[in-house]
Image (cartoon, rainbow, N blue to C red):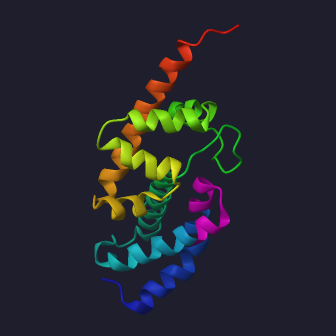
Amino acid sequence: MKSKEQFSQLVIQYERLVYTICFQLVRSAPAAEDLTQETFLAAYLHRDTMPEGYERQWLGRIAANKAKDYLQSAWNRHTVLPGDEALPPGLAPPAEEEVLGRAGAAEIADAIGRLSEPYRPVCRMCLLEERSVEETALALGRPVKTVHTQLRRGKAFLRQQLERSESHEVVP
């Protein structure tokens, strides 16, 4: 177990490394700064499991995992449109995001109204009312993870509905 003084020295020694790892993955300076703080907080809370002599690798793995978690949660929280500069290079938006981007707001609202429970209220609140997953979970009295799953599945159902309606349209 590292003392507070020893841990402070680790922070000073590896803060640039941890920041660089986070920035390389998320491509956002403010997010990388936050993730650097989260990395050292997690490392401090679990400092008794830090392997002696492998501090650099251990901190690097925590930083990479924090950045990956951030990217996954940001992906679910925000609607990403093609060509969005906030999107990390090399990643394409999910298919349901592209279909939802092409569809009109009235068509999307109508499609959400046709969804079954539990997807309808989640999609209505997150997509139409632009509430966060956390706000939606609180309002519906559901766990956040459950709302994340229901939103992902609801988007997939919406994509299917909208693709079917696009394929049945007659093009003049």
Image position of 145 (left or right of 11): left
| Residue 163, magenta (yes or no) | no
Task: Tell whether position 23 is magenta.
Answer: yes
Q: Is residue 5 visible?
A: yes
Q: x%, y% of residue 49? A: 29, 72
Q: Where is residue 156 in the image (x, y as percent from the top left)?
A: 42, 33
Residue in view at x 57 percent, y 74 percent: 15
For the stretch drawn in magenta, the main secondary structure is: helix
> Which of the image's four quarters has the C terminus?
top right
Where 159 sits versus 55, above or below? above
Confirm whether residue 72 shows in the render.
no
Residue 99 against residue 170 in the figure, above or below: below
Residue at left offset 49%, top offset 58%: 131
Q: What stretch is highlighted in magenta?
A: 21-33
14 left or right, relative to 81: left
Question: Where is residue 57 drawn, in percent x and y?
Answer: 45, 62
- The answer to whether 83 appears left or right of 3 in the picture is right
